[in-house]
């Protein structure tokens, strides 16, 4: 249940679910994102997927692979193998460290879930709603606020300009999106600044993240923006990888999910066992 308080600017009653004061529009420092959902603790792999999807977590960028035995370096993951649930970390050198292996799905999911939260908290992101009251220096954490005297119209104009800038950046990033092939049976897809590849011929085969395209002048290997069944591989835009990218992209404009936009997997300690 949402708690109530008074707006520090106009004194009106506001709740923890109000991002801004309904009366004067000032930011609410007591705002708690998703008051109902943050208490939810996933106990199964499917519930963990749901938890991450509802919060728009870009799992590929975060390097968390839920329900998948991902074998490349720099990855956290969980999957079921027979009767056992396996929680793992692939370190930077490709070595795998097993955090848990056993029949207890709840325990396995909790191990990965706690690591997921820990990685988020280290970046100042709190999907569980547990924002610390004090910083390491002992002073109360303060969110940046827009002075209440700034007319709402100025805020709207600023938001519009920022959106326009980001829209331009997005168009530039995605201008080379499409399929590329090297003639060896492997097809690549370029999305933004990332590469994905597959040799899977099933209708919705999995596409894997690639470090880079095997040729510097990748423009010469373009197959076009539209998939062709004659290539003998699955359609990237019908894969689960594409669906996850679209879910992440569609939610990136929301205040709740925008914190993940600057996620850098290089900030993770990939050399430790966990």
Image: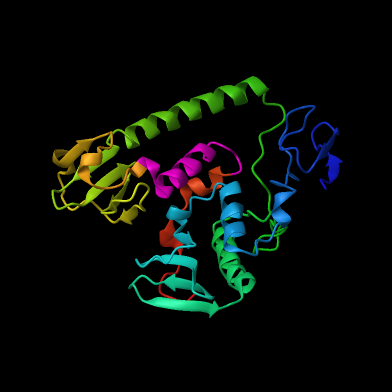
Q: Is residue 242 left or right of residue 36?
A: left
Which region is colored magenta?
Answer: 237-256
From the viewer's perspective, is residue 87 above or below residue 130?
below
Q: Position of residue 44 (x, y in %)?
A: 61, 64
Asked if residue 240 is among those painted magenta in the image, a careful observer would answer: yes
Q: Position of residue 253 (x, y in %)?
A: 53, 36
Q: Based on the displayed image, in which of its 4 quarters is residue 104 positioned?
A: bottom right
Q: Based on the displayed image, in which of its 4 quarters is residue 10 positioned?
A: top right
Q: Position of residue 75 (x, y in %)?
A: 42, 65
Q: Is residue 125 left or right of residue 36?
A: left
Asked if residue 8 is among those painted magenta in the image, a careful observer would answer: no
**Residue located 56% across and 58% down the image:** 120
Q: How many marks?
A: 0
Q: Position of residue 189 (x, y in %)?
A: 28, 44
**Residue located 62% across and 69% down the image:** 110
Q: Nearer the viewer, residue 13 or 225?
A: 225
Task: Inspect this view and state whether residue 195 appears.
Answer: yes
Helix, strand or loop for the magenta stretch, by majority: helix
Q: Is residue 103 left or right of residue 132?
A: left
**Residue located 21% across and 52% down the image:** 186
From the viewer's perspective, is residue 116 above or below residue 29?
below
Task: Inspect this view and state whether residue 125 appears.
Answer: no
């Amino acid at each position: 249940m949402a708690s109530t308080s008074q707006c520090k600017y106009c004194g009106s009653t506001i709740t923890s679910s109000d991002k801004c004061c309904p009366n004067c529009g000032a930011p609410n420092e007591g705002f708690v994102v998703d008051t109902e959902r943050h208490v939810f603790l996933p106990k199964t792999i499917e519930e963990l997927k749901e938890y991450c999807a509802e919060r728009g977590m870009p799992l590929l960028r975060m390097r968390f692979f839920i329900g998948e035995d991902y074998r490349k370096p720099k990855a956290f993951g969980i999957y079921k193998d027979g009767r056992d649930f396996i929680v793992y970390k692939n370190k930077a050198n490709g070595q795998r460290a097993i955090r848990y292996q056993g029949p207890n799905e709840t325990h396995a999911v909790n191990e990965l879930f706690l690591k997921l939260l820990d990685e988020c908290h280290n970046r100042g992101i709190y999907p569980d709603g547990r924002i610390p009251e004090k910083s390491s220096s002992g002073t109360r954490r303060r969110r940046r606020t827009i002075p209440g005297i700034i007319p709402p119209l100025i805020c709207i104009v600023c938001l519009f300009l920022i959106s326009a800038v980001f829209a331009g950046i997005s168009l530039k990033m995605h201008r080379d999106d499409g399929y590329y092939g090297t003639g060896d049976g492997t097809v690549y897809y370029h999305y933004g600044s990332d590469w994905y590849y597959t040799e899977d011929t099933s209708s919705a085969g999995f596409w894997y993240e690639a470090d880079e395209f095997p040729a510097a002048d990748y423009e010469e290997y373009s197959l076009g923006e539209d998939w062709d069944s004659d290539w003998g591989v699955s359609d990237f835009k019908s894969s689960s990888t594409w669906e996850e990218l679209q879910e992440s992209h569609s939610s990136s404009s929301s205040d709740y999910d925008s914190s993940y936009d600057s996620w850098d997997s290089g900030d993770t300690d990939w050399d430790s066992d966990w």
